[in-house]
Image (cartoon, helix red, strand yellow):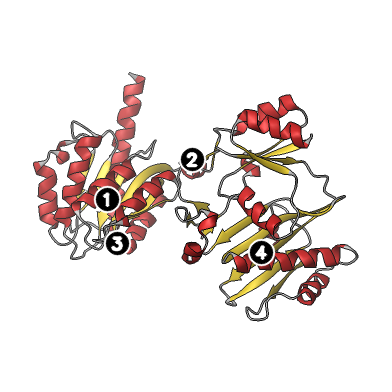
Amino acid sequence: MARLLEFEAKALLRAAGIATPKGRMAVSVEDAVAIASEIGFPVVLKAQIPVGKRGKAGGILFAQTADEAHDQARALFGKVIYGFPVTQVLVEQKLEIKDEHYLAILSNPATKTPTLIFARNGGMDVEEQAASGAEGLVTFDIDIIDGLRPYMALDTLVRAGISGRALPAIAQMAVRLYAVYRKHDCVLVEVNPLALTARGLLAADARISVDDDSLFRHPDLGLDERGEVGDRERSPLELVAAQIDAHDHRGSAHFVQIDPDGSLAKAEGKVSIGFDGVGTGVSLATMDELVPLGFLPRNFCDTSGNPTASKLYRITKVILSQPDLEGYVFVSCLSSQQLDNTARGIVKAFPELYPDRKPNIPCVFCFRGAWDETAIAMFDQHGLTQSPLVQVLGRDASERDVAMAFRDLHARWRDSNRAGALA
């Protein structure tokens, strides 16, 4: 999916006749103060990042005066939230909300239809409502041929307990949301919260995700270079890594950051490491052995399909450019991949990363498969195995052997660092 930022999503909603709070995008502290003064206080300042739950991470702040808007904007610009630096801030009027709901149209993989979802209680915890089967949450599967008719939306809302003047207004918004969903080939159009105010219904927040396969039909959205990983936009390193495969299909160098800024590892009390595997199966098996030992791969990387040495050279530099790593693990599966090419790329990258060929973090390499002995010999010839922080394993090693070897090497490195600090 390619996800629009909130201000981009709201622009599409306004074009479809759906009301949003008054506000504009700011790209600097001074810009934010000017916009806030123009629309009037109090205001809300929202970091524009491609992930959810930013409010819980300090990405939504409020201001009652121009001085306060200046301080809050300064706090947001440059702040890193879930691995994404804040470079844009949406400044909007603060709403006096009487009631808030959840309204969405999404592509439902279970029913293979668009589905209307409405929850009487909107907000950050709507997912928990859905999981618990809370009263007031209803769905309606939409026939793609018939579309969403007003009476269908009305019937759905009545089932949720909506009545009075809000009923036709929310139904009309649902129909308009579906129009946005169809027009832009969306997989999700979400308003949360759908705010009931003295001015009527407003889309206080909005999220829109577009099907990757349809982006060529929507150049106006400017999404051709985005793409998402799970529930977020690609990180800068992921965009760099994507270029490695872009014009060369000889094998893959698929790179995804599991924990872009290392915050997950810290929260879980684990050690953050770089990781590369030849084959998804062996990668997952090795991760299953590493995680219980206290290590969390910062990234997932699959360099399989017999990639060229140049691909391994570039992806190794990408992996090891991640900050604050406490180690690196490379493991191959038993396959026909030419591991001499793999090793050639790695031994070219390491002298550039570590000029004396001695990395400053523990590194375990496991070569198993075609030309594995040549790969190991190449490490010897280039002096990598002379480093006390490098261990190379061969075809007899299991995934557990790899994890245990890394655990022992990391322990020696950690104890050595502590001894040096005490000295």
Residue 308 sits above or below residue 364 on the image: below
Tell me the residue that label 4 is attached to: 131
**In front here: 87 or 302?**
87
Disc with the residue nearer the chain's start (4 vs 1): 4
Give the Cα separation between the discs numbered 2 and 4. 28 Å
Q: Which mark is residue 266?
A: 2
Tell me the residue that label 3 is attached to: 279
**In front here: 201 or 267?**
201
Residue 135 visible in the displayed image: no
Q: Amino acid at mark 4?
A: Ala
x and y percent of residue 61 in the render? 69, 36
Tell me the residue that label 1 is attached to: 330
Q: Residues within 10 Å of mark 1 (few under 14, many from 20)?
A: many
Q: Amino acid at mark 3?
A: Gly
Q: Are marks 2 and 3 in contact (CB under 8 Å)?
A: no
Disc with the residue nearer the chain's start (2 vs 3): 2
x and y percent of residue 131 in the render? 66, 64
Disc with the residue nearer the chain's start (2 vs 4): 4
Report helix, strand or loop for mark 3: loop
**Quadrant of residue 149 in the image?**
bottom right
Residue 95 visible in the displayed image: yes
Q: Residue at x 56, y 34 (%)?
A: 79
**In front here: 103 or 367?**
103
| Figure quadrant of the C terminus | top left
Is 262 situated left or right of 104 in this image? Answer: left
Report helix, strand or loop for mark 2: helix
Disc with the residue nearer the chain's start (1 vs 3): 3
Q: Residues within 10 Å of mark 4 (few under 14, many from 20)?
A: few
Report helix, strand or loop for mark 1: strand
Q: Amino acid at mark 2?
A: Lys
Disc with the residue nearer the chain's start (3 vs 4): 4
**Quadrant of residue 252 in the image?**
bottom left
